[in-house]
Image (spheres, rainbow, N blue to C red):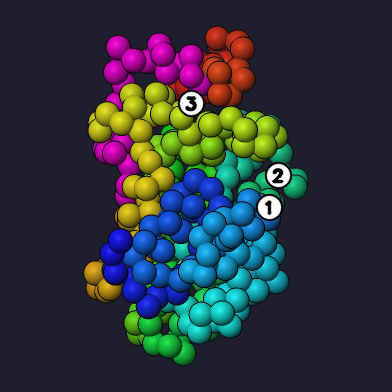
Amino acid sequence: MGNRLEGKVAVITGGVSGIGRATVLKFIAEGAKVVIADIQEEKGRELEAELGSAVRFIPTDVCSEVDIMSMIELAQSEFGRLDCLFNNAGFGGVSGEIHEIDLGEPYHRTVDAMLTGPIMGMKHAARIMREQGSGSIINTASVAGLQAGFAPHIYTAVKAALVNVTRSVALELGPFSIRVNTICPGGIATPIFAGQKAVSEGGNVDYSAVIKPLLQGMQPIPRAGESEDIANAACFLASDESSFISGHALVVDGGVSAGMWSNPATTPGLLAVIKEVLGISEDEELDRVFHAR
């Protein structure tokens, strides 16, 4: 137990699982009060009961401005202030080659959840933080937002936009002592790699464990990234230790953005893992997906 966030109040979107849950646990251990905002209501209520008075859960669809407003207002009404907003909720989003991308509802949901949602969060957090004269806003972007080749086209575009709107908002809010930064994860072992399959199976499969062998061979540091790696970065950006850091994209990726790393001794096993997780049966299609990562 520490006290790096003692007396601080945070809102964390996507706080029920993966990176969000790890960050909730880290922030509480460091003394913060936390509003957990997530679309997974049943699991959210269970987590609230488990963690007790240090947290409040609120069902939140980050595509809804009404829901975003409610989570911000809950932090203020329950805990009296808002020191940190961590716009973390996300998913893989719409995919496909450029000539076949569905630009209907899947496209709009991807953009709304991972770009419009954080913008709405910043909008409503800024109102409270300006009055306080302090605050830290953290957006989860990706190494895919810094260079191409790591993710589907729309995910890549959205994360690049999020990196740059973060910088823009940092310029505006800096005079109010509000810091705005992004975290750019690399390969973190969470169910996001399993996409819709993980959702449809209700989280009964531990995809985080399944995907770890894949990530161990995809970056210079020979282990998969863990949710706790991102939680530690978020704790730093939420704390006073980062009081002179704003407009920054903090890369937490095991060195993968320095250059793609391939270990011939492990690559065949990695292909098998991708095949199992993504449910791809044709070797030709598997090869295409692997080399697009």
- Figure quadrant of residue 177: bottom left
Q: Amino acid at mark 1?
A: Glu
Closer to the camera in the image, 267 or 47: 47
Q: Residues within 10 Å of mark 1 (few under 14, many from 20)?
A: few
Q: Residue at the spot x=41%, y=64% of the render?
A: 28
In the rendered structure, find residue 65 and report the number of the disc placed on it.
none
Q: Is residue 273 magenta?
A: yes
Q: Which label lies toward us, 1 or 3? A: 1
User: In the current view of this chain or complex, which residue is farthest to the bottom?
Assistant: 131
Mark 3 and mark 2 lie on one chain; the one further toward the N terminus is 2
Height in image: 49 above or below 80?
above
Q: Which mark is residue 42?
A: 1
Please give the residue where the numbered disc 2 appears in the rendered image. 106
Q: Position of residue 165 (x, y in %)?
A: 47, 64
Amino acid, disc 2: Pro
Q: Are marks 1 and 3 in contact (CB under 8 Å)?
A: no
| Mark 2 or 1, nearer chain start | 1
Residue type at the position of mark 3: Val
Part of the protein shown in magenta: 251-274
In which quadrant will I find the C terminus? top left
| Residue 116 visible from this viewpoint | no
**Residue 88 image offset from top left, x and y in percent:** 50, 56
Is residue 7 in view?
yes
Extreme-right residue of the structure: 104
Q: Which residue is mark 3?
A: 210
Quarter of the picture holding the N terminus: bottom left
At mark 1, the secondary structure is helix
Q: From the viewer's perspective, is 6 left or right of 12?
A: left
At horizontal 38% and vertical 82% (from top left) the residue drawn is 134
Separation (CA) of disc 2 from disc 1: 24 Å
Which quarter of the picture shows residue 60? bottom right
| Towards the viewer: 292 or 33 | 33
